[in-house]
Image (cartoon, rainbow, N blue to C red):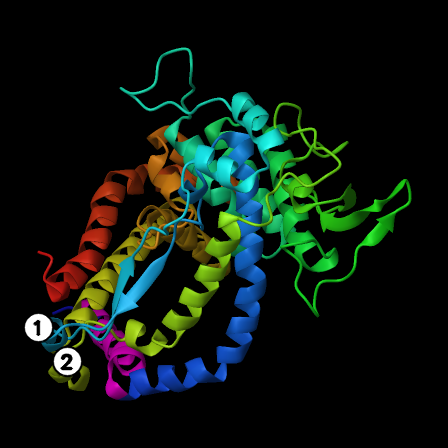
C-alpha cells in the first residue's frame, strides 16, 4: 500500500470515528440533547419571527404568479412525528418523522374563496391566468412555466432570504440565476423588493394579523394619508427604501409606485381584502409553529436516528458511519480531481484560491443532491446548459477565472449525474431499510 493511500485510509477512519463520537454514540446523543435545551428558548423566539416572515412573504407569489398556496415552499414543508413500533425500534429507529399535507384549502381558488372578501375575490380570480397541466387544461387558456423558472419562483426565491444573510450575497445569487434561466430581471427585482418589504414589515410596522406584540414597532404615519404606515426595507441593490401601506395585503399584492411591475400587482382598495374571521394561512402558520416546537424536543433523537445499540457502541458496526465515510471518500476523490486540474492549468495558484475552486465543485454536487430539497429543486430542473451557465457566472462573480472554471466543469460534467445519484441513494437507503419500506 502506497504511503498516500495509507494516509487516506487512516484519515477516513479518523473522520468516521469523530463523526460517530459526536453524533451517533450514546455520549454524542446526550450532548446534542443537552445543547438543544441550552438554545431552546432562543430557537423558539427566533422561529416566531422567521416562520411567519417566510410564510407571509411567500404568499405574495400565490396571486401574483398563480401558485396554489401549499405548492409554495416553505408552506408545503410540513412534518409530524410518531414513536417507532417494536420492529422499527429493534432496527435502530428512535423517532419517525412523516411528511404531512395540512388540512387547509390548498388550491388558489380555495384560498381566494375562503380568505378574500366576496366583493374582491372573483375579480382577482378572473385576472389570474391559469397554470397549465399537460393533458388536462386547454391550449390557449393557460400557460406553462419552464420547470426551472417555476421552481425558482416557487421555492428558491424565498430561500435566498434565509440562505444569504447579506444583501450583496443574495444579489449575486439572483443575478446568476436570472442570466441562466433568462428570466425578466425587472420582474425578479420587483418581486425580491416586495418580499423584502413584507419581511421588514413584520417588526418595523405593526399590521393586523401579522405584527408581533411587544416586538413590532408602531408604524410611522404617512404624511399624505395618516391611515397608511411607512415600511422601511432594503432593496436588491442594498439601498434603503420605504413604502406606504395600509394592510398586509397591500404589501403582498398591491401596486406601489417605483417598486412593483405592471401586470404583477393589484390596485388595492382602501379597505382590507382579507376575511379576518377565517384565514387559512393564519392557521397554517400557527400549526407550523406548534409542530416545530414539538419536533424540536426530539432534535437529539433525529440526529442520532437509525442506530442500534451495538452500533452506538462501536463505530465499525454503525451502518450510518460507513455510509458517511463512503460519501466522504467520494468528496476526497472530487477534491483530488480538482487539485490535479489546477496543478496542470494554474500551478502557481495560492492555496486559498485553489480552495475556492474546490468549494465551487462541491457546491455544484451538493446543490444537485440536497435531500431536504427546499429551494434546491430548481437546480435539478435546469437543463445542462442552464446549470453550467448559472454555476460559471456565479463563481466568476466571486472572482474565479472563467477559463479555469470551464476546464473544471468539462472534467466534472460526466461524473455529476452518477455522483448525485449515489449521494441520494446512499442517503435514502438506510432510512428505507430501517423503516421497512424496501
Q: Is residue 9 magenta?
A: yes
Q: Quadrant of the C terminus?
A: bottom left
- Residue 45 lies in the magenta stretch: no
Q: Residues within 10 Å of mark 1 (few under 14, many from 20)?
A: few
The image position of residue 143, as x and y in percent, is: 43, 19
Q: Main secondary structure of the magenta part?
A: helix
**Residue 167 visible (yes or no):** yes
Instruction: Give residue 87's mark.
Output: 1
Circle 1 SS class: helix
Give the tally of numbered discs: 2
Residue 311 has which mark? 2
Relative image position of residue 289 (x, y in whole percent): 47, 64
Judge the density around disc 2: few (<14), some (14-19), many (≥20) Cα neighbours within 10 Å.
many
- The residue that appears at 58% across and 55% down in the rendered structure is 53
> Which residue is drawn at the image coordinates 34% and 31% (left, top)?
384
* Residue extent of the magenta highlight: 5-26
Among the 4 quarters of the image, the one containing residue 122: top right
Of callouts 1 and 2, the N-terminal one: 1
- 247 left or right, relative to 60: right
x%, y% of residue 263?
A: 62, 23
**Quadrant assignment, res 434:** bottom left
Left or right: 80 as drawn, with respect to 62 = left
Amino acid at each position: 500500500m502506497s504511503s498516500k493511500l495509507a494516509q487516506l485510509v487512516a484519515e477516513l477512519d479518523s473522520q468516521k470515528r469523530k463523526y460517530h463520537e459526536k453524533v451517533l454514540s450514546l455520549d454524542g446523543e446526550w450532548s446534542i440533547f443537552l445543547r438543544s435545551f441550552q438554545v431552546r428558548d432562543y430557537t423558539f423566539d427566533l422561529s416566531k419571527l422567521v416562520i411567519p416572515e417566510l410564510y407571509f412573504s411567500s404568499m405574495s407569489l400565490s396571486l401574483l404568479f398563480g401558485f396554489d398556496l401549499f405548492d409554495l415552499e416553505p408552506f408545503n414543508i410540513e412534518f409530524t412525528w410518531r414513536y417507532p413500533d417494536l420492529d422499527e425500534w429493534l432496527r435502530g429507529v428512535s423517532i419517525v418523522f412523516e411528511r404531512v399535507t395540512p388540512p387547509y384549502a390548498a388550491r388558489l381558488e380555495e384560498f381566494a374563496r375562503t380568505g378574500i372578501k366576496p366583493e374582491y375575490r372573483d375579480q382577482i380570480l378572473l385576472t389570474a391566468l391559469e397554470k397549465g397541466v399537460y393533458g388536462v387544461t386547454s391550449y390557449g387558456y393557460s400557460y406553462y412555466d419552464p420547470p426551472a423558472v417555476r421552481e425558482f419562483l416557487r421555492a428558491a426565491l424565498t430561500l435566498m432570504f434565509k440562505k444569504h444573510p447579506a444583501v450583496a450575497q443574495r444579489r449575486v445569487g439572483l443575478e446568476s440565476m436570472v442570466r441562466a434561466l433568462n428570466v425578466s430581471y425587472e420582474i425578479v427585482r420587483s418581486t425580491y423588493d416586495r418580499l423584502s418589504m413584507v419581511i421588514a414589515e413584520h417588526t418595523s410596522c405593526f399590521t393586523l394579523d401579522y405584527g408581533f406584540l411587544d416586538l413590532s414597532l408602531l408604524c410611522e404615519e404617512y404624511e399624505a394619508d395618516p391611515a397608511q404606515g411607512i415600511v422601511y426595507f432594503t432593496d436588491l441593490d442594498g439601498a434603503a427604501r420605504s413604502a406606504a401601506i395600509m394592510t398586509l395585503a397591500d404589501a403582498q399584492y398591491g401596486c406601489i409606485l417605483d417598486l412593483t411591475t405592471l401586470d404583477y400587482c393589484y390596485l388595492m382598495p382602501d379597505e382590507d381584502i382579507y376575511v379576518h374571521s377565517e384565514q387559512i394561512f393564519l392557521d397554517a402558520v400557527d400549526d407550523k409553529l406548534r409542530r416545530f416546537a414539538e419536533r424540536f424536543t426530539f432534535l437529539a433523537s433525529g440526529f442520532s436516528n437509525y442506530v442500534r445499540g451495538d452500533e452506538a457502541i462501536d463505530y465499525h458496526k454503525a451502518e450510518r458511519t460507513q455510509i458517511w465515510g463512503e460519501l466522504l471518500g467520494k468528496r476526497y476523490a472530487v477534491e483530488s480531481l480538482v487539485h490535479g486540474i489546477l496543478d496542470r492549468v494554474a500551478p502557481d495558484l495560492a492555496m486559498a484560491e485553489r480552495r475556492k475552486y474546490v468549494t465551487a465543485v462541491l457546491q455544484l454536487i451538493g446543490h444537485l443532491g440536497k435531500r431536504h430539497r427546499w429551494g434546491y429543486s430548481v437546480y435539478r430542473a435546469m437543463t445542462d446548459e442552464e446549470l453550467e451557465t448559472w454555476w460559471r457566472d456565479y463563481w466568476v462573480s466571486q472572482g474565479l477565472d472563467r477559463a479555469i472554471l470551464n476546464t473544471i466543469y468539462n472534467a466534472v460534467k460526466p461524473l455529476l449525474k452518477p455522483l448525485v445519484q449515489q449521494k441520494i441513494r446512499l442517503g435514502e437507503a438506510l432510512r428505507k431499510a430501517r423503516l421497512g419500506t424496501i
